Image (tube, helix red, strand yellow):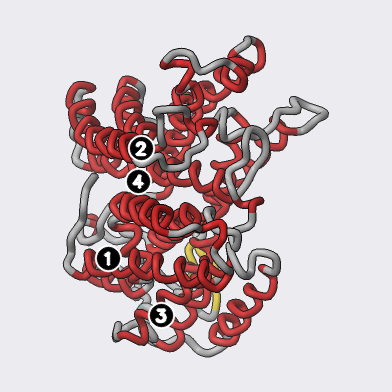
Amino acid sequence: AAVLLWCALQARRDFFVNYDYAALITDFLLNVGAILAAVTIYSSTPFILNIFLFLPAISLYLLPPNSRSRPKRPSHTNGYMEKDKDKTLLDPLPERPYITHYRGSMMVVTCVAILAVDFKVFPRRYAKVETWGTSLMDMGVGSFVFSAGLISARPILKARINDSVSTVGASLKAAARHSLPLLALGLVRLYSVKGLDYAEHVSEYGVHWNFFFTLAVLPLSGALLHLLPQRLSTIHIFALLMSGTYEAVLHFTSLKAYILTAPRDDFLGQNREGIFSLSGYVSIFLMGQVIGLDILPRQKVAPTFTMAGTRVQLQTLTRLFFWAAWFSVLLFLATSYRIVGLHVSRRLANLPYVLWVSAFNCAQLALFCAVERIIFLGSHMDTDKAAETRRSKYATSSVLGAYNKNGLAIFLLANLLTGAVNMTTDTLKASRERAMATLFVYMGTLTTVATVLQQRKMSIKL
């Protein structure tokens, strides 16, 4: 709803074209403040918050669109059907504002939750569950991995476009460059948690394992999969087989009992949740990569419908809704008591968890895509790269773009700030007002850092 209102303000009023302090504050309040409010003070009445956001968005949408949001239509054909010489002017992997909004919003929710969970203003039902069930933070962990898989498809697609073939060794070397910083961050977190006696729940990942170690494994696993044909169907089937095989092992052997109840008397036993859940997280990563391979390239065929005299592209949107429906059906079959009767478990990262995360993220992408396609009529129908870049920037929130551009660095800073707040504040005894003030300053600090990095065109690669 917040992104919908942002898009309506931009498309109908050019509100964020001249990006002054008023625009920045509005951008922050809509795309960060609304999320913060949704998981705290409006957590029991989300309907009211949605009304506050939807009503002005709908009112603005009923106004006529301005010239910026309605591109000039080519006289003969659209950008997808230009002659070969004109096709070269268009980026085969264009920037997608709806993907930026999806990834940026996911990062904002993640940053909010990792500190808010320590305050009473954050509902316990949103915190990670112990073993079975679902929550906001359980989805956040999986969405982070799914999002990483989504963008990992870009190097694969670039290699296809350039007709270049990379060996497994070269892929592993490139993956190691991404994994080593994450491994180092994991070691730093391990040292800080143990050295400062910071509160932790060993049932999440184990005694020594943490989320950074899990993230470090993902690029290496993706590189090893270069042994497989880099086709969408092959990767999808492999991911389903991997998570399905892991689920079968959990069900038909004593592995599930071992993970949940075994004593922590050796390294494997102490870190069993983090180590064995890698299968599920790699599957989620691959599911994200499958979606990336499907939606990131420029679509050569663009079926459209006409709305307000402008063609609205359907292909990507319908494909996203298809993927959301496909994963939802699989999830229903896996969790239905009359069929399989499995339960979602983030701690195990089992098959239902993989399907649940995949279905939700595909649905989220579809909704963000629908908002962009309807509000910014005719988006992605320009006939040259420069015009397409301008339109993409016009349709993208600067705040969400900043979180998307340096997501992992901001996530690291959020962890550091969370530790600092917990070391200096008794969060469980903090009043509602103090909790909200602390969270507001915390998110303002993260947003300021992210925005400054973006304005200076700095991208911190970890």
Please tell me whether residue 319 is drawn above or below residue 404 in the rendered image: above
Q: On the image, numbered disc 1 is attached to which residue?
A: 449
- The answer to whether 289 appears left or right of 180 in the picture is right
Please tell me whether residue 363 is drawn above or below residue 24 in the rendered image: above
Q: On the image, numbered disc 2 is attached to which residue?
A: 212
Q: On the image, numbered disc 3 is attached to which residue?
A: 70
Label 2 to label 1: alpha-carbon separation: 21 Å
Q: Nearer the viewer, residue 72 or 439?
A: 439
* Amino acid marked by disc 1: Val
**Which numbered disc flags the more N-terminal residue, 2 or 1?**
2
Q: Mark 3 Cα within 10 Å, few/some/many (few <14, many 20+)? A: some
**Which numbered disc flags the more N-terminal residue, 4 or 1?**
4
* Amino acid marked by disc 3: Arg
Where's residue 258, x and y in %? Answer: 59, 15
Q: On the image, numbered disc 4 is attached to which residue?
A: 151
**Which numbered disc flags the more N-terminal residue, 2 or 4?**
4
Label 4 to label 3: alpha-carbon separation: 29 Å
**Which numbered disc flags the more N-terminal residue, 2 or 3?**
3
- The answer to whether 8 appears left or right of 408 in the picture is right
**Which numbered disc flags the more N-terminal residue, 1 or 3?**
3
